[in-house]
Structures are given as C-alpha cells and as structure tokens.
Image (tube, helix red, strand yellow):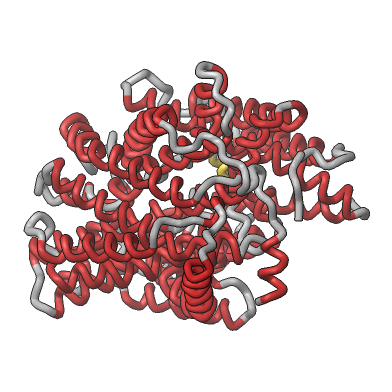
C-alpha cells in the first residue's frame, strides 16, 4: 500500500494543484446546462429508437472548446472540463429514463411529467452522492489499473486543444475520420454499419461486427487483455451457447419459454433475444457481486484512510490540495439519507420503506460495480440495463412475497429499477468525468456539483420529452419500439405472474462463477456475454492493433510514443463518431428526412471501410518517433 501510494503521489496533472484557473464559472454553467438538455433529449429519442445511447463527454469537450475558445476567447481547460461534465448528466439521465420508464406508457398508465422528473432526479442525485466516497479508490488508487477509456480520451481532447500543434492535429484527423465514417454510414446510409456472417455449415454460429471507428478507438485505449476477455464472452454466447440451444431445440415444434416461437424457427438473433439476454443478465449480476466482494476490503481500507487523512489534516491545520477535495462527506451522507427517506414516504412513487431500502442497498452495490466497469470497458459498453434487470428481478420477487402484486407491485418494482438505473448511468458517467478531471487537474467537488446541476437541468425536461414522443409516435410502436423498457416490462410481468426463466438466469450465474475460477475477470467476460458479439469484435480489433504496436516496438520510449500517438488518434475517432451520432439523433428528433435503409447491403464495402480506418490507426501510431503528448509524467 505504501509503495503504491508513493507511486501515485508523484502523479502531476496537466494543471497542477498549485494553479487556480477559472472553472465553475457562469459561462461554463450556462453552456453546460444547454448542452445537457440537448444531449439528454437526443439520447432519450435514440434510446427509445434503438436501445442505445451516445456518449456525450468527448463531443461536449469538442463543442465546449469550439465555443469557449473560438467565440468567447476563454483559455481555461478547467472550464471546458466543467462543461463536458455537466453535459454527460444529460446523457445519463436520458439513458436511465428510456431504459425503464416507458414501461409505464406500455401499461397505459400515462405517468405525469412530475413523476418522471422525480424518479430520475432522485436517481441522479444518488448516483453522484454514492460515487463521491469511491473517487479516491477508483480514480486515484487504481489510476494505473483502470484506464477509463472515454475519460482518458476526453482528457487528451482537452489537452490537445490547450497545447495545439501536433496534438491537436492528431485528434482533429481522427475526429474527421470517425465523423465522416459515421455520417456516410448512419447518416447518408451509403453502406450498412453492421456486418455479420454465418460460420460455414455450423448452424446458428454467427460472428459479426459493428463497423464503428469509436469502438475501434476504445479497443486501442483499453488494450488487448481486456478486449480479449470481452470478446471471449461474446464468442461464448455466439459460437457456443446459441448453436447449442439451436441444436438441442431443432426438433421442437412448440415454443420453449421465454421465446414465443419454436427454436427450430429462430435464427441466431432470435435465440439471442429469447434466451441469451437472460443468461447474460444472470452472468452480469453475479459477476458484479463477485467484483464487489473482491473490492470490499480495498474499499473499506480506502475509506478508512480517507477519513483518517481528513482528521489528521484538520488536527494539524492542513487542508487538502485543490485537486483532492471532494464534496463534504457530511453533506453527502445527509443528502443520501434525505433522498432515501423521501423515496420511502412520498406518495408520488409509493415504493415504501422496503423499496427505499432496496434502492439504497442495490444503488450503492451496483454504483460501485458500474463505476469500476466503465473504468474497464467505457460508458458506452457498460451493462447498465443488465444490472437494472438484476435489481428488478430481486425487488419484484420481494414485493411479490410481501403481497404487493398486480399493478401496484409492478409500478413499485419498475420505480425501484428506474431509480437504480439512473443512479448507475450517472455514476458511470461522473466516474469518467472525474478521471478526466484527475488527468487535467480539475477540482473534484466542483465537478461533482456541476454534475448535480446538469442532473437537475436535464431531469426536469426528460419527462416532457417522453410524453411528447409518446403522443407523437406511441411507445412500443414501430417508430418508437423502446426495446430496453419492453424487456423490463416482460421481466416484471413474468415475476409477478411467476413464469420467469430462472434456469437461464442461474445458467448465467454459474457461468460467471466458472469464469472467475479460471482466473479471468468474470465481469469483463460477462459484459461480453451480455452484449452482442458485434460490439466486442471491433473493440478486439482495436486491442489487436495496440498489441501489434507493442510487439514491433522494441524500445520502451518508442513504444510509449506510439501508444500516446495512437491514443490521440483513437480519441479523435471516438469524438468524431460520437458528435456526428448526436447530430443524427437531433435531426431524427426534428423529423429531418433520413434514409431508412443503406444504399448497398454489400458487407464487403463496410468491412473495407473499417479496415481502412484500422490501417490508418496502425499507420499513425507506428510512424511516431517521439512522445507527442506534452505533459509531465511520474
């Protein structure tokens, strides 16, 4: 512990703790609120449309630099950091809302905007409060072990704008490439962005890839080991479990619960949707518990040392450095307690004391797990819905045992799930933001306060967005399928009716235990198992590029220079695609005509485009001769 602490104490952020730059300014707050609202609305629509949301931190950093530096001529990197922190609140609130609350519309309950706002605001506040005591453990103590790919990439974007020169050019080149591919693929629909192929005569064995530059960039940043374990989970699902289910169910002529069609009539995607999602949910839930149990000793030690350090500093009259000051633990504790008590006794949600206690327990448990997951695979690949499913399963079971069934029990279970889901999304995003702040030299308590302001701004409007979209298209319709909320609806109804596929969930749980005994990171593998292999594949290719760079770089200085150069270009890929993705979502929300299907279904074109981007990443990183990142290192 002492060696580790000594090593970490040498880390000097881009802006040292002795410097004081404009940070939580009026201009930053106003711009952050506006971007939080825009990104929250765009991601709410996108989540209802395809079940996924777009990461907001890097696009927000790029937009912030363009506005603050280009228009207002403001030079503070810490101001930009506050803006991107607030913007991610909109993305997180949007995800927490659309993954769960549309189920209320599907039940024809027509929830009020006030009820929706109350649920997401309480979840958002809990996400921030519960992450505060974890910051030193995950961001500081685990600095060398948890890459936080999007937070690291965002820091590079901010620093490139600060230093200019070759750094900015590298990010800008990656930004153009990533944005151009996204615009041509998902905007103008010149080619399809998802490709897949059947493996010979191996029935139902499918491998595929979402040909997105951002996923390639994430893979390069997290490296081959983590990416390899993630793809292992994906391959376990798509070339082992899915073909196995298809083989043993080939002779059945009746639908086998929970699918609504016979297995003989299901393709790989049908088996994945009908069976693997439940296996993956069980695996993620148990792997998260395993991770939490393994982390508890370090967590308690870290919190003990933090409290001891605070007391020693108070007794000696010393104060913490600017870059190590969190919100007051007293106010964090009181705030958490106040939110739990309000949830327990307010008639607006009617979850009762049991529901409030469940929110407190599962909230802190999964907030800790989610904050660590995003440190490994990034916010975009964090299985928030999987952990929400685990929460809903347990809570619905408890409510049913207490006699809370029917409409009352279903609403209460969904409300608990929605609060926890929002807390997880917010905690994951602020974890990435705090990593960015740690690297650039931000003040933690100011970022935490900025996140809460962003939660309020986006939380008050997300209910309006949901109601308007429901009135325009109808939740569950072809235009607005709300896939994640539909899954929550099915699970809750299944629990209340007593017909949930527990065998599949236990199968996933047992798989996670076996993976842990094999010496692998069960949580990373479980994430790969839960997500389609199409997401893990480009991440693995990015990790492979990183491995090749390391393999062909014999000298440590050259190896580090190439890693840093590749990270800058990869950060640009993530930024470009993310920003264009949000623009496309806004255009869709504004009813701007966008093609419904790609011009060509030829997968070789998509593969060729992705391979060109992969080659560019390799070439840019490989040609580096000196370290391009102008920063002080430990």
* Residue 290 seen in render: no
Image spot of residue 79 (x, y percent): 51, 34
Q: Count of labels shown? A: 0
State the residue at coordinates (9%, 72%).
Answer: 404
347 w.r.t. 60: above or below = below
Identify the image quadrant of the C terminus: bottom right
The foreground one among 225 and 315 is: 315
* Residue 610 seen in render: yes
The foreground one among 527 and 476 is: 527
Identify the image quadrant of the N terminus: bottom right
Image spot of residue 358 (x, y percent): 25, 71
Image spot of residue 555 (x, y percent): 92, 53
The furthest residue to the bottom: 517
State the residue at coordinates (63%, 30%).
Answer: 175
State the residue at coordinates (79%, 38%).
Answer: 628
Q: Is residue 134 left or right of residue 423?
A: right
Q: Is residue 616 left or right of residue 129?
A: right
The foreground one among 570 and 449 is: 449
- Can you tell which quarter of the image residue 620 is in? top right
67 w.r.t. 388: above or below = above
State the residue at coordinates (65%, 36%).
Answer: 159
């Amino acid at each position: 512990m002492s060696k580790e602490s000594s090593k970490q104490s040498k880390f000097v952020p881009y802006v040292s703790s002795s410097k004081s730059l404009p940070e939580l300014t009026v201009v930053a707050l106003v711009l952050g609120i506006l971007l939080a609202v825009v990104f929250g609305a765009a991601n709410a629509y996108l989540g209802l449309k395809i079940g996924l949301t777009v990461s907001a931190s890097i696009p927000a950093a790029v937009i912030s630099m363009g506005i603050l530096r280009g228009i207002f001529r403001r030079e503070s990197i810490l101001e930009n950091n506050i803006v991107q922190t607030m913007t991610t609140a909109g993305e997180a609130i949007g995800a927490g809302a659309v993954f769960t609350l549309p189920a209320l519309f599907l039940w024809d309950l027509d929830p009020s905007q006030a009820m929706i706002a109350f649920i997401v605001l309480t979840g958002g506040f809990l996400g921030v409060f519960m992450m505060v005591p974890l910051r030193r453990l995950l961001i500081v103590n685990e600095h060398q072990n948890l890459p936080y790919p999007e937070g690291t990439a965002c820091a590079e974007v901010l620093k490139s704008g600060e230093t200019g020169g070759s750094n900015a050019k590298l990010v800008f080149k990656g930004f153009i490439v990533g944005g151009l591919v996204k615009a041509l693929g998902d905007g103008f629909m010149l080619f399809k962005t998802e490709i897949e192929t059947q493996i010979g005569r191996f029935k139902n064995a499918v491998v595929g890839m979402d040909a997105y530059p951002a996923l390639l960039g994430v893979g390069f940043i997290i490296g081959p080991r983590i990416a390899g374990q993630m793809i292992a989970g994906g391959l376990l699902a798509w070339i082992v479990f899915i073909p196995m289910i298809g083989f043993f169910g080939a002779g059945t002529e009746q639908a086998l619960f929970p699918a609504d069609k016979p297995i003989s009539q299901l393709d790989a995607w049908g088996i994945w949707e009908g069976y693997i999602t439940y296996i993956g949910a069980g695996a993620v839930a148990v792997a998260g518990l395993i991770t939490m149990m393994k982390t508890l000793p370090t967590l308690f030690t870290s919190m003990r040392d933090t409290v001891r350090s605070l007391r020693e500093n108070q007794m000696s009259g010393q104060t913490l450095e600017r870059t190590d000051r969190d919100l007051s633990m007293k106010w964090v504790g009181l705030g958490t307690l106040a939110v739990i008590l309000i949830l327990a006794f307010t008639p607006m949600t009617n979850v009762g004391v049991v529901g409030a206690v469940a929110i407190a327990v599962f909230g802190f448990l999964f907030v800790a797990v989610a904050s660590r997951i995003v440190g490994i695979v990034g916010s975009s690949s964090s299985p928030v819905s999987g952990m929400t499913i685990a929460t809903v399963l347990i809570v619905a079971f408890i409510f049913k045992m207490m006699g809370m069934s029917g409409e009352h029990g279903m609403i209460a279970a969904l409300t608990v799930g929605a609060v926890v889901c929002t807390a997880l999304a917010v905690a994951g995003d602020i974890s990435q933001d705090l990593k960015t702040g740690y690297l650039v030299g931000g003040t933690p308590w100011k970022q935490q306060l900025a996140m809460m302001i962003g939660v309020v701004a986006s939380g008050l409007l997300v209910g309006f967005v949901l109601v308007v979209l429901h009135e325009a298209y109808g939740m569950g319709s072809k235009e607005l399928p709300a896939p994640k909320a539909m899954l929550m609806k099915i699970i809750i109804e299944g629990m209340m009716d007593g017909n949930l596929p527990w065998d599949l969930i236990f199968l996933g749980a047992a798989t996670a235990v076996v993976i842990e005994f094999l010496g692998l990171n069960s949580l990373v593998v479980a994430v790969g198992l839960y997500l389609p292999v199409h997401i893990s594949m480009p991440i693995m290719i990015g990790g492979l590029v990183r491995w090749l760079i390391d393999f062909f770089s014999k000298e440590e200085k050259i190896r580090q220079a190439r890693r840093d150069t590749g990270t800058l270009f990869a950060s640009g890929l993530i930024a470009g695609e993310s920003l264009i993705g949000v623009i496309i979502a806004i255009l869709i929300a504004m009813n701007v005509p966008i093609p419904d299907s790609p011009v060509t279904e030829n997968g070789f074109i998509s593969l060729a485009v992705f391979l060109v981007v992969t080659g560019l990443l390799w070439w840019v990183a490989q040609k580096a001769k000196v370290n391009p990142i102008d920063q002080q290192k430990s």
